[in-house]
Amino acid sequence: MSNVSIDSIMLSKMFLAGAKNLDSKKEWINELNVFPVPDGDTGTNMTMTIMSAAKEVATLNSDDMVTLCKSISGGSLRGARGNSGVILSQLLRGFTKVVKESEEIDTKILAAASEKAVETAYKAVMKPKEGTILTVAKGISTKARELADAGETDIDTFLKEIIAYGNSVLEKTPDMLPVLKQAGVVDSGGQGLMVVLEGAYDLYSGKDVNIDVMESTVTPGVSKVDSYKESLTSEDIKYGYCTEFIILLEKSFNIKQELDFKSYLESIGDSIVVVADDEIVKVHVHTNDPGMAIQKALMYGSLSNMKIDNMRLEHRENLVRHNAKGELEIIEGVEISSVYKQPQKEEEPAMEHKEDAFIAISVGEGMDEIFKSLGVDMVISGGQTMNPSTEDILNAIEKMNADNVFILPNNKNIILAANQARDLTTDKNAVVIPTKTIPQGIAALIGYVPGSEVSVNEASMTEAIGNIKSGEVTYAVRDTTIDDKEIKSGDYMGIGDGKILAVGAKLENVVLDMIDGMVDDSTELISLYYGEDIDEAKAQSLSKKIQKRHKNCEIELQYGGQPIYYYIVSAE
Protein backbone atom coordinates (compact mmCIF):
# COMPACT_ATOMS: atom_id res chain seq x y z
CA MET A 1 0.00 0.00 0.00
CA SER A 2 1.36 3.40 -0.97
CA ASN A 3 1.90 5.85 1.86
CA VAL A 4 1.75 8.90 -0.42
CA SER A 5 -1.39 8.26 -2.49
CA ILE A 6 -4.80 6.57 -2.55
CA ASP A 7 -6.15 4.85 -5.66
CA SER A 8 -9.81 4.27 -6.56
CA ILE A 9 -9.87 0.76 -5.08
CA MET A 10 -8.64 2.00 -1.71
CA LEU A 11 -10.96 5.03 -1.81
CA SER A 12 -13.91 2.76 -2.53
CA LYS A 13 -13.10 0.55 0.46
CA MET A 14 -12.54 3.57 2.71
CA PHE A 15 -15.88 5.04 1.67
CA LEU A 16 -17.69 1.77 2.42
CA ALA A 17 -15.92 1.51 5.77
CA GLY A 18 -16.96 5.06 6.67
CA ALA A 19 -20.56 4.34 5.70
CA LYS A 20 -20.57 1.12 7.70
CA ASN A 21 -19.13 2.86 10.76
CA LEU A 22 -21.87 5.49 10.58
CA ASP A 23 -24.51 2.78 10.23
CA SER A 24 -23.26 1.04 13.37
CA LYS A 25 -23.29 4.24 15.44
CA LYS A 26 -26.42 5.93 14.11
CA GLU A 27 -28.47 5.44 17.29
CA TRP A 28 -25.76 7.03 19.40
CA ILE A 29 -25.73 10.02 17.05
CA ASN A 30 -29.53 10.20 17.20
CA GLU A 31 -29.25 10.57 20.98
CA LEU A 32 -27.16 13.73 20.54
CA ASN A 33 -30.28 15.57 19.38
CA VAL A 34 -30.55 18.86 21.29
CA PHE A 35 -34.20 18.35 22.12
CA PRO A 36 -34.59 15.06 24.02
CA VAL A 37 -37.48 13.97 21.78
CA PRO A 38 -38.08 10.33 20.76
CA ASP A 39 -37.52 11.05 17.07
CA GLY A 40 -33.90 12.19 17.06
CA ASP A 41 -33.00 11.46 13.47
CA THR A 42 -29.62 12.96 12.52
CA GLY A 43 -27.85 9.60 12.66
CA THR A 44 -30.62 7.87 10.74
CA ASN A 45 -30.78 10.57 8.05
CA MET A 46 -27.03 10.68 7.53
CA THR A 47 -26.85 6.88 7.42
CA MET A 48 -29.66 6.54 4.88
CA THR A 49 -27.98 9.23 2.77
CA ILE A 50 -24.55 7.62 2.70
CA MET A 51 -25.97 4.09 2.37
CA SER A 52 -27.79 5.14 -0.79
CA ALA A 53 -24.38 5.83 -2.31
CA ALA A 54 -22.57 2.94 -0.59
CA LYS A 55 -24.91 0.35 -2.09
CA GLU A 56 -24.16 1.69 -5.55
CA VAL A 57 -20.43 1.65 -4.84
CA ALA A 58 -20.66 -1.94 -3.58
CA THR A 59 -22.08 -3.11 -6.93
CA LEU A 60 -19.39 -1.50 -9.10
CA ASN A 61 -17.24 -3.76 -11.24
CA SER A 62 -15.05 -0.88 -12.39
CA ASP A 63 -11.94 0.47 -10.65
CA ASP A 64 -12.25 3.75 -12.57
CA MET A 65 -12.09 6.86 -10.35
CA VAL A 66 -14.70 8.76 -12.39
CA THR A 67 -17.21 5.91 -12.09
CA LEU A 68 -16.61 5.64 -8.36
CA CYS A 69 -17.04 9.39 -7.83
CA LYS A 70 -20.26 9.47 -9.84
CA SER A 71 -21.69 6.66 -7.70
CA ILE A 72 -20.73 8.43 -4.47
CA SER A 73 -22.04 11.82 -5.61
CA GLY A 74 -25.18 10.69 -7.44
CA GLY A 75 -26.16 8.06 -4.87
CA SER A 76 -25.86 10.40 -1.91
CA LEU A 77 -27.59 13.23 -3.78
CA ARG A 78 -30.65 11.10 -4.57
CA GLY A 79 -30.74 9.43 -1.17
CA ALA A 80 -30.26 12.61 0.88
CA ARG A 81 -32.63 12.90 3.84
CA GLY A 82 -32.92 15.68 6.38
CA ASN A 83 -30.70 18.74 6.63
CA SER A 84 -27.75 16.73 7.91
CA GLY A 85 -28.11 14.23 5.07
CA VAL A 86 -28.37 16.94 2.40
CA ILE A 87 -25.28 18.69 3.78
CA LEU A 88 -23.40 15.37 3.84
CA SER A 89 -24.41 14.74 0.21
CA GLN A 90 -23.14 18.19 -0.77
CA LEU A 91 -19.84 17.59 1.03
CA LEU A 92 -19.44 14.34 -0.91
CA ARG A 93 -20.47 16.04 -4.14
CA GLY A 94 -17.86 18.78 -3.75
CA PHE A 95 -15.18 16.32 -2.68
CA THR A 96 -15.71 14.07 -5.70
CA LYS A 97 -15.66 17.00 -8.13
CA VAL A 98 -11.95 17.37 -7.43
CA VAL A 99 -11.02 13.75 -6.78
CA LYS A 100 -12.48 12.42 -10.05
CA GLU A 101 -9.85 14.30 -12.05
CA SER A 102 -7.02 12.06 -10.78
CA GLU A 103 -6.37 8.33 -10.69
CA GLU A 104 -4.11 8.69 -7.64
CA ILE A 105 -4.98 11.02 -4.76
CA ASP A 106 -2.22 12.65 -2.73
CA THR A 107 -2.38 15.08 0.20
CA LYS A 108 -2.54 18.15 -2.06
CA ILE A 109 -5.53 16.72 -3.91
CA LEU A 110 -7.18 15.76 -0.60
CA ALA A 111 -6.74 19.34 0.62
CA ALA A 112 -8.23 20.79 -2.57
CA ALA A 113 -11.10 18.29 -2.45
CA SER A 114 -11.84 19.17 1.19
CA GLU A 115 -11.99 22.86 0.30
CA LYS A 116 -14.37 22.18 -2.60
CA ALA A 117 -16.52 20.02 -0.32
CA VAL A 118 -16.92 22.85 2.19
CA GLU A 119 -17.57 25.44 -0.52
CA THR A 120 -20.30 23.27 -2.08
CA ALA A 121 -21.98 22.51 1.26
CA TYR A 122 -22.03 26.13 2.41
CA LYS A 123 -23.65 27.20 -0.87
CA ALA A 124 -26.46 24.67 -0.33
CA VAL A 125 -27.49 26.22 2.99
CA MET A 126 -29.29 29.56 2.79
CA LYS A 127 -28.24 30.72 6.27
CA PRO A 128 -25.21 28.68 7.38
CA LYS A 129 -24.92 28.39 11.13
CA GLU A 130 -21.62 27.88 12.93
CA GLY A 131 -21.32 25.16 15.54
CA THR A 132 -22.71 22.58 13.12
CA ILE A 133 -21.43 19.94 10.70
CA LEU A 134 -20.41 22.82 8.42
CA THR A 135 -18.03 24.17 11.06
CA VAL A 136 -16.47 20.75 11.60
CA ALA A 137 -16.04 20.26 7.84
CA LYS A 138 -14.48 23.73 7.51
CA GLY A 139 -12.05 22.95 10.34
CA ILE A 140 -10.99 19.72 8.62
CA SER A 141 -10.51 21.59 5.35
CA THR A 142 -8.40 24.30 7.00
CA LYS A 143 -6.16 21.71 8.66
CA ALA A 144 -5.84 19.74 5.42
CA ARG A 145 -4.67 22.85 3.56
CA GLU A 146 -2.22 23.73 6.33
CA LEU A 147 -0.66 20.25 6.24
CA ALA A 148 -0.48 20.10 2.44
CA ASP A 149 1.13 23.54 2.21
CA ALA A 150 3.64 22.53 4.90
CA GLY A 151 4.77 19.68 2.67
CA GLU A 152 3.17 16.74 4.48
CA THR A 153 2.97 13.86 1.99
CA ASP A 154 2.40 10.83 4.21
CA ILE A 155 -1.28 9.88 3.90
CA ASP A 156 -1.42 8.13 7.27
CA THR A 157 -0.03 11.14 9.15
CA PHE A 158 -2.22 13.50 7.11
CA LEU A 159 -5.44 11.60 7.91
CA LYS A 160 -4.61 11.18 11.60
CA GLU A 161 -3.96 14.88 12.03
CA ILE A 162 -7.07 16.13 10.22
CA ILE A 163 -9.25 13.67 12.18
CA ALA A 164 -7.70 14.81 15.47
CA TYR A 165 -8.27 18.43 14.50
CA GLY A 166 -11.84 17.71 13.36
CA ASN A 167 -12.61 16.16 16.73
CA SER A 168 -11.16 19.19 18.52
CA VAL A 169 -13.42 21.48 16.47
CA LEU A 170 -16.37 19.19 17.25
CA GLU A 171 -15.67 19.52 20.98
CA LYS A 172 -15.89 23.31 20.62
CA THR A 173 -19.33 23.31 18.93
CA PRO A 174 -21.14 23.77 22.29
CA ASP A 175 -19.22 27.06 22.72
CA MET A 176 -20.52 28.25 19.32
CA LEU A 177 -24.15 27.22 19.84
CA PRO A 178 -25.47 27.93 23.34
CA VAL A 179 -28.31 25.46 22.86
CA LEU A 180 -25.73 22.66 22.51
CA LYS A 181 -23.97 23.75 25.67
CA GLN A 182 -27.20 23.90 27.63
CA ALA A 183 -28.17 20.42 26.44
CA GLY A 184 -24.69 19.08 27.19
CA VAL A 185 -24.07 17.65 23.71
CA VAL A 186 -21.83 18.27 20.70
CA ASP A 187 -23.36 18.82 17.27
CA SER A 188 -24.84 15.55 16.06
CA GLY A 189 -24.17 16.23 12.37
CA GLY A 190 -20.54 17.06 13.07
CA GLN A 191 -20.24 13.88 15.11
CA GLY A 192 -21.69 11.90 12.20
CA LEU A 193 -19.10 13.35 9.84
CA MET A 194 -16.27 12.41 12.19
CA VAL A 195 -17.63 8.87 12.50
CA VAL A 196 -17.47 8.52 8.70
CA LEU A 197 -13.88 9.77 8.56
CA GLU A 198 -12.81 7.57 11.47
CA GLY A 199 -14.29 4.49 9.81
CA ALA A 200 -12.48 5.33 6.58
CA TYR A 201 -9.18 5.77 8.41
CA ASP A 202 -9.59 2.50 10.31
CA LEU A 203 -9.67 0.64 7.02
CA TYR A 204 -6.75 2.60 5.56
CA SER A 205 -4.61 1.91 8.63
CA GLY A 206 -5.10 -1.84 8.24
CA LYS A 207 -7.74 -2.60 10.84
CA ASP A 208 -10.07 -5.54 10.17
CA VAL A 209 -13.21 -3.65 9.11
CA ASN A 210 -16.51 -5.07 7.85
CA ILE A 211 -17.47 -3.20 4.68
CA ASP A 212 -20.53 -5.27 3.72
CA VAL A 213 -23.00 -2.40 3.45
CA MET A 214 -25.77 -4.78 2.35
CA GLU A 215 -26.15 -5.70 6.02
CA SER A 216 -27.41 -2.21 6.91
CA THR A 217 -30.48 -2.20 9.15
CA VAL A 218 -31.56 1.30 8.15
CA THR A 219 -33.50 0.75 4.99
CA PRO A 220 -34.20 -2.15 2.66
CA GLY A 221 -31.95 -2.13 -0.36
CA VAL A 222 -30.82 -4.49 -3.08
CA SER A 223 -29.15 -7.43 -1.41
CA LYS A 224 -26.77 -9.75 -3.14
CA VAL A 225 -28.75 -11.64 -5.74
CA ASP A 226 -27.63 -15.10 -4.65
CA SER A 227 -28.54 -14.65 -0.99
CA TYR A 228 -31.82 -13.07 -2.05
CA LYS A 229 -32.77 -16.11 -4.08
CA GLU A 230 -31.80 -18.53 -1.31
CA SER A 231 -34.18 -16.90 1.18
CA LEU A 232 -37.24 -16.82 -1.09
CA THR A 233 -40.50 -18.66 -0.53
CA SER A 234 -43.25 -18.99 -3.13
CA GLU A 235 -45.11 -16.09 -1.57
CA ASP A 236 -42.05 -13.84 -1.71
CA ILE A 237 -41.57 -14.01 -5.47
CA LYS A 238 -43.59 -11.04 -6.71
CA TYR A 239 -41.42 -10.50 -9.78
CA GLY A 240 -40.13 -13.62 -11.46
CA TYR A 241 -37.15 -12.61 -13.60
CA CYS A 242 -33.82 -11.36 -12.26
CA THR A 243 -32.69 -9.14 -15.13
CA GLU A 244 -29.21 -7.66 -15.51
CA PHE A 245 -27.52 -5.84 -18.38
CA ILE A 246 -25.19 -2.98 -19.24
CA ILE A 247 -26.23 -0.04 -21.44
CA LEU A 248 -23.46 1.22 -23.73
CA LEU A 249 -24.56 4.84 -23.84
CA GLU A 250 -25.11 6.46 -27.22
CA LYS A 251 -27.21 9.38 -25.95
CA SER A 252 -27.12 11.78 -23.04
CA PHE A 253 -27.86 10.19 -19.66
CA ASN A 254 -27.86 12.98 -17.09
CA ILE A 255 -29.14 12.79 -13.50
CA LYS A 256 -32.71 13.64 -14.57
CA GLN A 257 -32.75 10.89 -17.22
CA GLU A 258 -31.20 8.46 -14.74
CA LEU A 259 -33.98 9.20 -12.25
CA ASP A 260 -36.63 8.85 -14.98
CA PHE A 261 -35.22 5.47 -16.01
CA LYS A 262 -35.08 4.28 -12.41
CA SER A 263 -38.65 5.48 -11.84
CA TYR A 264 -39.77 3.48 -14.90
CA LEU A 265 -38.06 0.34 -13.58
CA GLU A 266 -39.80 0.85 -10.22
CA SER A 267 -43.14 0.84 -12.08
CA ILE A 268 -42.45 -2.64 -13.49
CA GLY A 269 -40.40 -4.28 -10.76
CA ASP A 270 -38.28 -4.01 -7.64
CA SER A 271 -34.75 -4.75 -6.28
CA ILE A 272 -33.42 -2.05 -8.58
CA VAL A 273 -29.81 -0.95 -8.99
CA VAL A 274 -28.87 1.67 -11.61
CA VAL A 275 -25.22 2.72 -11.59
CA ALA A 276 -24.14 5.13 -14.33
CA ASP A 277 -20.97 6.78 -15.53
CA ASP A 278 -20.18 8.75 -18.67
CA GLU A 279 -20.19 5.73 -21.00
CA ILE A 280 -22.13 2.85 -19.42
CA VAL A 281 -25.06 2.15 -17.13
CA LYS A 282 -25.19 -1.03 -15.07
CA VAL A 283 -28.78 -2.20 -14.47
CA HIS A 284 -30.30 -4.81 -12.16
CA VAL A 285 -34.08 -5.31 -11.74
CA HIS A 286 -36.54 -8.00 -10.71
CA THR A 287 -39.54 -7.87 -13.05
CA ASN A 288 -42.25 -10.00 -14.63
CA ASP A 289 -41.47 -8.60 -18.11
CA PRO A 290 -37.72 -8.26 -18.86
CA GLY A 291 -38.61 -7.11 -22.37
CA MET A 292 -40.11 -3.88 -21.05
CA ALA A 293 -36.90 -3.06 -19.17
CA ILE A 294 -34.82 -3.91 -22.22
CA GLN A 295 -36.96 -1.82 -24.61
CA LYS A 296 -36.68 1.20 -22.34
CA ALA A 297 -32.93 0.74 -22.01
CA LEU A 298 -32.50 0.60 -25.81
CA MET A 299 -33.66 4.23 -25.95
CA TYR A 300 -30.29 5.18 -24.44
CA GLY A 301 -27.91 2.86 -26.31
CA SER A 302 -26.99 -0.72 -27.14
CA LEU A 303 -26.90 -3.51 -24.56
CA SER A 304 -24.27 -5.98 -23.41
CA ASN A 305 -23.70 -8.53 -20.62
CA MET A 306 -27.40 -9.44 -20.64
CA LYS A 307 -28.48 -12.03 -18.08
CA ILE A 308 -32.05 -13.11 -17.24
CA ASP A 309 -32.78 -15.71 -14.54
CA ASN A 310 -36.21 -17.24 -13.95
CA MET A 311 -36.38 -17.05 -10.16
CA ARG A 312 -39.67 -18.94 -10.00
CA LEU A 313 -38.19 -21.84 -11.95
CA GLU A 314 -35.07 -21.82 -9.80
CA HIS A 315 -37.23 -21.82 -6.71
CA ARG A 316 -39.21 -24.76 -8.05
CA GLU A 317 -35.98 -26.65 -8.64
CA ASN A 318 -34.84 -25.86 -5.11
CA LEU A 319 -38.02 -27.43 -3.79
CA VAL A 320 -37.08 -30.71 -5.45
CA ARG A 321 -34.32 -32.81 -3.93
CA HIS A 322 -32.92 -36.27 -4.40
CA ASN A 323 -33.84 -38.86 -1.80
CA ALA A 324 -31.49 -41.50 -0.42
CA LYS A 325 -32.07 -43.73 -3.47
CA GLY A 326 -31.14 -40.98 -5.90
CA GLU A 327 -34.80 -40.47 -6.87
CA LEU A 328 -36.40 -37.03 -7.09
CA GLU A 329 -38.50 -36.16 -4.07
CA ILE A 330 -40.94 -33.25 -3.63
CA ILE A 331 -40.74 -31.48 -0.29
CA GLU A 332 -43.92 -32.36 1.55
CA GLY A 333 -46.68 -29.77 1.72
CA VAL A 334 -45.41 -27.50 -1.07
CA GLU A 335 -47.68 -26.77 -4.01
CA ILE A 336 -45.34 -26.33 -6.97
CA SER A 337 -48.02 -24.75 -9.17
CA SER A 338 -48.24 -21.84 -6.75
CA VAL A 339 -44.81 -20.74 -7.89
CA TYR A 340 -46.20 -19.66 -11.26
CA LYS A 341 -48.98 -17.45 -9.97
CA GLN A 342 -48.28 -13.85 -10.97
CA PRO A 343 -49.92 -11.03 -9.08
CA GLN A 344 -51.81 -8.46 -11.08
CA LYS A 345 -50.52 -4.95 -10.52
CA GLU A 346 -53.09 -2.19 -10.48
CA GLU A 347 -52.06 0.82 -12.50
CA GLU A 348 -52.66 4.28 -11.09
CA PRO A 349 -55.06 6.39 -13.16
CA ALA A 350 -53.32 9.11 -15.14
CA MET A 351 -53.52 12.55 -13.58
CA GLU A 352 -55.33 15.15 -15.69
CA HIS A 353 -53.16 18.06 -16.74
CA LYS A 354 -53.48 21.16 -14.57
CA GLU A 355 -51.64 24.42 -14.23
CA ASP A 356 -50.72 24.06 -10.56
CA ALA A 357 -50.22 20.88 -8.52
CA PHE A 358 -49.36 20.41 -4.85
CA ILE A 359 -47.17 17.95 -2.97
CA ALA A 360 -47.19 17.90 0.84
CA ILE A 361 -45.12 15.90 3.29
CA SER A 362 -47.37 14.64 6.05
CA VAL A 363 -47.58 12.14 8.88
CA GLY A 364 -50.76 10.54 10.18
CA GLU A 365 -53.89 9.52 8.31
CA GLY A 366 -55.88 12.43 9.69
CA MET A 367 -53.29 14.95 8.53
CA ASP A 368 -53.17 13.25 5.14
CA GLU A 369 -56.92 13.68 4.70
CA ILE A 370 -56.76 17.33 5.75
CA PHE A 371 -54.14 18.06 3.10
CA LYS A 372 -56.09 16.20 0.42
CA SER A 373 -59.24 18.13 1.32
CA LEU A 374 -57.28 21.35 0.77
CA GLY A 375 -56.33 20.34 -2.76
CA VAL A 376 -53.02 18.48 -2.32
CA ASP A 377 -52.47 16.10 -5.25
CA MET A 378 -49.92 13.84 -3.58
CA VAL A 379 -49.04 13.29 0.07
CA ILE A 380 -45.59 11.91 0.86
CA SER A 381 -45.52 10.04 4.14
CA GLY A 382 -42.66 11.21 6.30
CA GLY A 383 -42.59 14.33 8.39
CA GLN A 384 -40.76 14.47 11.68
CA THR A 385 -40.44 10.75 12.32
CA MET A 386 -39.01 9.79 8.91
CA ASN A 387 -37.74 12.42 6.51
CA PRO A 388 -38.31 11.58 2.82
CA SER A 389 -35.30 11.58 0.53
CA THR A 390 -34.55 13.91 -2.35
CA GLU A 391 -35.44 11.03 -4.68
CA ASP A 392 -38.80 10.49 -2.95
CA ILE A 393 -39.69 14.11 -3.64
CA LEU A 394 -38.32 13.94 -7.20
CA ASN A 395 -40.46 10.88 -7.93
CA ALA A 396 -43.54 12.72 -6.65
CA ILE A 397 -42.76 15.73 -8.85
CA GLU A 398 -42.35 13.41 -11.83
CA LYS A 399 -45.89 12.08 -11.34
CA MET A 400 -47.44 15.56 -11.39
CA ASN A 401 -49.01 16.36 -14.75
CA ALA A 402 -48.79 20.10 -14.18
CA ASP A 403 -46.85 23.17 -15.30
CA ASN A 404 -46.07 24.27 -11.73
CA VAL A 405 -45.59 22.06 -8.70
CA PHE A 406 -45.75 23.59 -5.23
CA ILE A 407 -43.90 21.55 -2.60
CA LEU A 408 -44.74 21.86 1.11
CA PRO A 409 -41.98 20.24 3.24
CA ASN A 410 -43.87 20.95 6.50
CA ASN A 411 -40.71 20.32 8.49
CA LYS A 412 -37.54 22.39 8.78
CA ASN A 413 -35.48 19.22 8.37
CA ILE A 414 -36.99 18.49 4.94
CA ILE A 415 -36.62 21.92 3.31
CA LEU A 416 -33.07 21.30 2.02
CA ALA A 417 -34.06 17.97 0.45
CA ALA A 418 -37.04 19.68 -1.18
CA ASN A 419 -34.77 22.44 -2.52
CA GLN A 420 -32.39 19.80 -3.86
CA ALA A 421 -35.28 18.06 -5.64
CA ARG A 422 -36.43 21.40 -7.06
CA ASP A 423 -32.94 22.10 -8.45
CA LEU A 424 -32.85 18.68 -10.14
CA THR A 425 -36.23 19.18 -11.83
CA THR A 426 -35.99 20.31 -15.46
CA ASP A 427 -39.38 19.67 -17.08
CA LYS A 428 -41.60 21.49 -14.58
CA ASN A 429 -41.48 24.65 -12.52
CA ALA A 430 -41.00 23.34 -8.98
CA VAL A 431 -41.62 25.83 -6.18
CA VAL A 432 -40.70 25.10 -2.55
CA ILE A 433 -42.76 26.93 0.05
CA PRO A 434 -40.50 26.75 3.15
CA THR A 435 -43.10 25.42 5.59
CA LYS A 436 -41.49 24.17 8.80
CA THR A 437 -44.58 22.66 10.45
CA ILE A 438 -47.83 20.95 9.51
CA PRO A 439 -49.91 24.02 10.56
CA GLN A 440 -47.74 26.22 8.34
CA GLY A 441 -48.43 23.86 5.42
CA ILE A 442 -52.15 24.13 6.02
CA ALA A 443 -51.92 27.92 6.23
CA ALA A 444 -49.93 28.07 2.99
CA LEU A 445 -52.60 26.09 1.13
CA ILE A 446 -55.30 28.40 2.44
CA GLY A 447 -53.20 31.34 1.21
CA TYR A 448 -53.15 29.98 -2.35
CA VAL A 449 -55.29 31.97 -4.81
CA PRO A 450 -56.42 29.95 -7.89
CA GLY A 451 -55.69 31.69 -11.18
CA SER A 452 -52.95 33.95 -9.80
CA GLU A 453 -49.42 34.05 -11.19
CA VAL A 454 -46.94 31.61 -9.65
CA SER A 455 -44.86 34.44 -8.17
CA VAL A 456 -47.97 35.98 -6.61
CA ASN A 457 -49.02 32.67 -5.04
CA GLU A 458 -45.50 31.96 -3.83
CA ALA A 459 -45.46 35.31 -2.05
CA SER A 460 -48.99 34.88 -0.70
CA MET A 461 -48.35 31.37 0.60
CA THR A 462 -45.02 32.35 2.15
CA GLU A 463 -46.66 35.33 3.85
CA ALA A 464 -49.40 33.06 5.23
CA ILE A 465 -46.93 30.82 7.04
CA GLY A 466 -45.57 33.86 8.87
CA ASN A 467 -48.97 34.43 10.51
CA ILE A 468 -49.01 31.01 12.19
CA LYS A 469 -47.57 29.97 15.55
CA SER A 470 -47.01 26.23 15.85
CA GLY A 471 -46.53 23.94 18.83
CA GLU A 472 -46.30 20.22 19.46
CA VAL A 473 -46.30 18.02 22.54
CA THR A 474 -44.22 14.87 23.01
CA TYR A 475 -42.19 13.25 25.79
CA ALA A 476 -38.53 13.47 26.84
CA VAL A 477 -36.18 10.53 26.34
CA ARG A 478 -33.41 11.80 28.61
CA ASP A 479 -32.63 14.30 31.35
CA THR A 480 -31.40 17.70 30.20
CA THR A 481 -31.80 21.46 30.58
CA ILE A 482 -33.01 23.59 27.67
CA ASP A 483 -34.25 27.19 27.62
CA ASP A 484 -33.62 27.26 31.40
CA LYS A 485 -36.14 24.45 31.86
CA GLU A 486 -35.04 21.31 33.69
CA ILE A 487 -36.36 18.25 31.88
CA LYS A 488 -36.52 14.71 33.27
CA SER A 489 -36.77 11.57 31.17
CA GLY A 490 -40.48 10.78 30.71
CA ASP A 491 -41.65 14.37 31.16
CA TYR A 492 -44.09 15.83 28.65
CA MET A 493 -42.70 18.75 26.63
CA GLY A 494 -44.45 21.49 24.70
CA ILE A 495 -42.18 22.72 21.90
CA GLY A 496 -43.18 25.89 20.06
CA ASP A 497 -41.29 27.33 17.08
CA GLY A 498 -37.97 25.87 18.19
CA LYS A 499 -38.29 26.57 21.92
CA ILE A 500 -39.40 24.58 24.94
CA LEU A 501 -42.55 26.38 26.10
CA ALA A 502 -43.75 23.95 28.76
CA VAL A 503 -42.55 20.91 30.71
CA GLY A 504 -44.38 18.75 33.22
CA ALA A 505 -45.59 15.36 34.40
CA LYS A 506 -49.22 15.85 33.30
CA LEU A 507 -50.01 15.92 29.58
CA GLU A 508 -53.04 18.24 29.78
CA ASN A 509 -51.20 20.80 31.89
CA VAL A 510 -48.31 20.89 29.44
CA VAL A 511 -50.65 21.43 26.48
CA LEU A 512 -52.49 24.22 28.30
CA ASP A 513 -49.27 25.91 29.41
CA MET A 514 -47.80 25.66 25.92
CA ILE A 515 -50.88 27.27 24.38
CA ASP A 516 -50.74 30.04 26.98
CA GLY A 517 -47.22 30.77 25.70
CA MET A 518 -48.40 30.85 22.09
CA VAL A 519 -51.53 33.00 22.40
CA ASP A 520 -51.49 36.79 22.46
CA ASP A 521 -54.12 39.54 22.11
CA SER A 522 -54.25 39.16 18.34
CA THR A 523 -54.95 35.41 18.38
CA GLU A 524 -58.36 34.48 16.98
CA LEU A 525 -58.15 30.76 16.22
CA ILE A 526 -56.53 27.84 18.04
CA SER A 527 -56.41 24.56 16.10
CA LEU A 528 -55.77 21.33 17.99
CA TYR A 529 -54.76 18.16 16.09
CA TYR A 530 -54.72 15.06 18.29
CA GLY A 531 -52.44 12.11 17.58
CA GLU A 532 -52.83 8.36 17.27
CA ASP A 533 -52.29 7.79 21.02
CA ILE A 534 -55.09 10.14 22.10
CA ASP A 535 -58.75 9.11 22.08
CA GLU A 536 -61.38 11.58 20.91
CA ALA A 537 -63.07 11.93 24.31
CA LYS A 538 -59.84 13.11 25.96
CA ALA A 539 -59.18 15.50 23.10
CA GLN A 540 -62.67 16.97 23.39
CA SER A 541 -62.27 17.39 27.15
CA LEU A 542 -58.99 19.24 26.63
CA SER A 543 -60.56 21.38 23.92
CA LYS A 544 -63.19 22.57 26.41
CA LYS A 545 -60.51 23.49 28.94
CA ILE A 546 -58.67 25.50 26.31
CA GLN A 547 -61.89 27.32 25.49
CA LYS A 548 -62.37 28.26 29.16
CA ARG A 549 -58.86 29.75 29.29
CA HIS A 550 -59.15 31.59 25.97
CA LYS A 551 -62.74 32.72 25.69
CA ASN A 552 -62.06 35.16 22.85
CA CYS A 553 -60.60 32.48 20.59
CA GLU A 554 -62.34 29.97 18.38
CA ILE A 555 -61.19 26.42 19.15
CA GLU A 556 -61.02 23.91 16.31
CA LEU A 557 -60.43 20.22 17.12
CA GLN A 558 -59.34 17.74 14.41
CA TYR A 559 -57.93 14.23 14.27
CA GLY A 560 -54.35 14.21 13.01
CA GLY A 561 -53.36 10.64 13.74
CA GLN A 562 -49.66 11.58 14.00
CA PRO A 563 -47.32 9.26 15.94
CA ILE A 564 -45.03 10.37 18.81
CA TYR A 565 -46.58 13.84 19.06
CA TYR A 566 -49.69 13.71 21.22
CA TYR A 567 -50.93 17.09 20.03
CA ILE A 568 -49.98 19.53 17.30
CA VAL A 569 -51.31 23.04 17.86
CA SER A 570 -51.54 26.20 15.79
CA ALA A 571 -52.47 29.71 16.88
CA GLU A 572 -53.37 32.46 14.43
Image: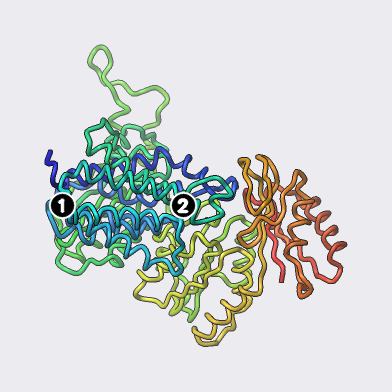
Instruction: Give the residue type that dot 2 points to.
Output: Thr
Is residue 85 found left or right of 292 in the rendered image?
right
Residue 374 circle label: none
**Residue under the image location 46 percent in, 49 percent down:** 188
Q: Position of residue 232 (x, y in %)?
A: 36, 35
Front residue of this view, candidates 167 and 468: 167
Is residue 279 found left or right of 472 in the rendered image?
left
Quarter of the figure that contains the C terminus: bottom right
Asked whether the viewer can see residue 11, the reply is yes
Residue 173 circle label: 2
Is residue 485 found left or right of 112 in the rendered image?
right
Instruction: Give the residue type that dot 1 points to.
Output: Gly
**Residue under the image location 25 percent in, 43 percent down:** 14
Q: Secondary structure at mark 1?
A: loop
**Residue under the image location 56 percent in, 70 percent down:** 376
Is residue 45 found left or right of 564 in the rendered image?
left
Q: Give the alpha-carbon distance from disc 2 to disc 1, as whole Å.
A: 29 Å
Front residue of this view, candidates 465 and 355: 465
Looking at the picture, does residue 66 appear above or below residue 47? below
Quarter of the figure that contains the N terminus: top left
Asked whether the viewer can see residue 294, the reply is no
Q: Secondary structure at mark 2?
A: helix
Residue 151 circle label: 1
